[in-house]
Amino acid sequence: MFFKETMEVATLGRPFSLGMLYDCRQDLVIPGMTLWDCNDLEKDRREQEQPNTESEIVASESIEDKSSALNAEASLKASFLGGLVEVGGSAKYLNDHKTSKYQARVTLNYKTTTRFQELSMNHLGRGNVKHPYVFEQGIATHVVTGILYGAQAFFVFDREVSKEETHQDIQGSLKVMIKKIPLLSIEGEGSLKMEDKDKKSVEKFSCRFYGDFCLQKPPTTFQEAVEVYKSLPTLLGTNGEKAVPMKVWLLPLTSLDSCAAKLVRQISIRLVQESQSVLEDFIELETRCNDALRTSTVQQFPQISKKLKSFKEMCSEFKLGFQRMLAKRLPSIRGGGEEEAELAEILKKRHSSPFNSKNLTEWMDCKEREISILKSFTNMMKNTKTVPSQNNLHEELLSAEHGLCFVFTSLGKDEPYLSALSDYLKETTKTDVHVYHTYNVEKEQWYLSKEVADDMRKEAKLFSDFAEANKENKKIKFLTVGLTNETQEGSSIYLYEGGFAVSENFEPPSKPETVTVADINHNNVTLKISPPRFGAENITSYSVEYCNPFSCPQRSLQCCKPPCLNTGTAALGRIHYRCCVPSHSFPPSLPCVGVTYRPSMFFRVCFCSHVKDHVVVLTIVDLVLFGQLDLSPCTSTILCCLFLHPLTDLVGSCLFVLMSSSVK
């Protein structure tokens, strides 16, 4: 062919034949109309063999590299990006994208050519056109004058990357194995001839196939992919009769008739690359959203899931709108109806909208950080169940007398940026154009406040410690949930009784401080208990549990029911103090014994040997005399004294272990 204006265009799986008309303004194949009769096209065409086979590794996922592998030049790529071109066969590879950043991917590209066909001067010479009225229709700009036949195939191999593995290492090993495919042989029993360690490695590979070959079953494993790869040369037929058009040569119709429609201008490479970058941004955001939605943390907190899904849907809507604008503008610009500046204006408008790349990426970064923070908090709470909704929370609380719930209160907080995205999509149909500015996405995030973060860490530690200390108490449930509460930013601890909230800002007591002996005289000892650092204002009383040191090892102390003691009798044991919780909150494991608590005040304790079915015994030294006394209700305040005799080495023999706290 000697025409200067001839264009080479990749078929991308579209049906082409010699003499077919083509509109380069919208990259559209026009079937059914031609300049010559079918017999003339068959009779005078020329054909020559052009055998060639090659394969290569494609490790990149960019649209640029995929287009290059399919020999699609910039203008055709722009049409694909705008949705003007519907690809088929091996070109469907252009639509394949990773669904997770935790995928390692390597693609094997196989390409073969068989023959080349072209029209002759008997068709293209002056006066040889049989149907000249086609020029007047203005529906096409070019005619197909040459076709290169062959076939192409892409084997897309994926391998999941675990948390213990590095993406780079897995990508490298995957690439090494894929390079071996052309060299591998299949043994008699159909197994691959390769080392055992390699066989074990490829078991984790998955495969997807995009090709111009007709397969009975597409490969899904590494071994199936090798078998298909080895069979590809035979699938085109003995003489290559099953080959498909891979590339076409197009002659402008103006070369045959100056009245024909023509391609006025092509889209500049710079604008094509900018459009490509926009769509690649949305592909990456979709992948990151998919990864976030799969995490157990997001599944536990539907407020985050709802925002991610909304964000993903709005990005998809904007992306489709952007592609529709490309599809509308590209043919008009190429045909001379509009200037290229129209496309530049579309790109500029996107940059000044809430859908600009900077804000979209920042929001996704913030969401991933929020998920990581939530995960770190939930991991702290070993004895806590996470429930996804208020309904699930109520179900859990109905099966327990008491419930303590760590509530993330800001997960469902409205985010102005998401509202801005939604408003922009609604206003794009209006004629007036609003000017949008860059948003401070990070400023909207609740967890970026140092004060809020510090308070949350303190509350989480108190909650976790309290749950650990009471993990054996079956009457109490410890739960975690996300509930919106604008009055409590970040988090709060809710206290429930009988399924109803008693407090929405409860502070569990921290571990009480050490018990010390403040005063000893001939018949009593005065104990001093320093208040705990947190939750001291809620403590009302303590209970004392008795444990015999001969039956309870020091490292695994268990509460034992002591023997019934009468006045003047003695017992040998070890002291444990446990904070008592009033009846409207938590029941103590043993009844209160009248230990009055007030911060920075002294305690005088008096114990009874037996009260109905409950026995509380305090033993300090070899001989302890007990007074018998009726126990008042837990909510009462009692000042008592512990009578001791003898006092020799009394303090040195005492062992006080303060276990936990009670609350109001």
Image (cartoon, rainbow, N blue to C red):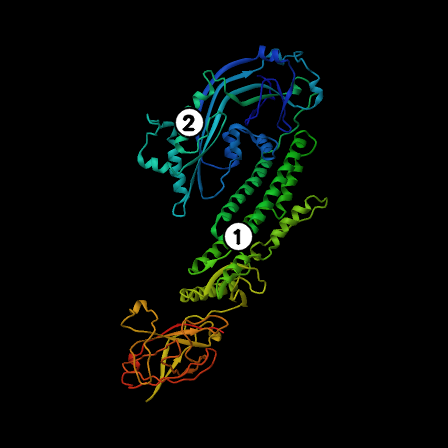
Give the residue at mark 1: 367
Relative to 310, is 483 above or below? below
Q: Which residue bears the numbered disc 2? A: 229
Q: CA distance from mark 2 to mark 1?
A: 43 Å
The residue under the point 37% across, 35% down is 176
In this view, the residue in front, 243 or 56, is 243
Question: Could you say which quadrant of the image residue 654 lies in?
Answer: bottom left
Q: Quadrant of the N terminus?
A: top right
Label 1 neighbour load within 10 Å: few <14, some 14-19, many 20+: some
Residue in view at x 69 percent, y 48 percent: 434
* Residue 258 seen: no
The picture places residue 309, in percent across and down from the top left corner, at 56, 48
Kind of residue at disc 2: Tyr
Give the class, few, some or many, for how many residues have Cα within 10 Å of label 2's Cα (few <14, many ≥20): some
Q: Is residue 368 above or below residue 161?
A: below
Mark 1: which secondary structure?
Answer: helix
In the rendered structure, which disc, 2 or 1, sits on the residue that comes first in sequence? 2
Q: Which numbered circle lies on residue 176?
A: none
Left or right of residue 604, residue 133 in this image? right
Q: Is residue 536 visible?
A: yes
Picture quadrant of residue 173: top left
**Residue 532's quadrant in the figure?**
bottom left
Q: Circle 2 — which element?
A: helix
Q: Nearer the viewer, residue 265 or 535?
A: 535
Q: Position of residue 243 (x, y in %)?
A: 50, 20
Q: How many marks?
A: 2
Tag 1: residue type?
A: Lys
Q: Nearer the viewer, mark 2 or mark 1?
A: 2
* Image position, residue 480 (x, y; %): 49, 60
Q: Residue at x 49, y 69 (%)?
A: 507
- In this image, 525 relative to 452: left or right? left
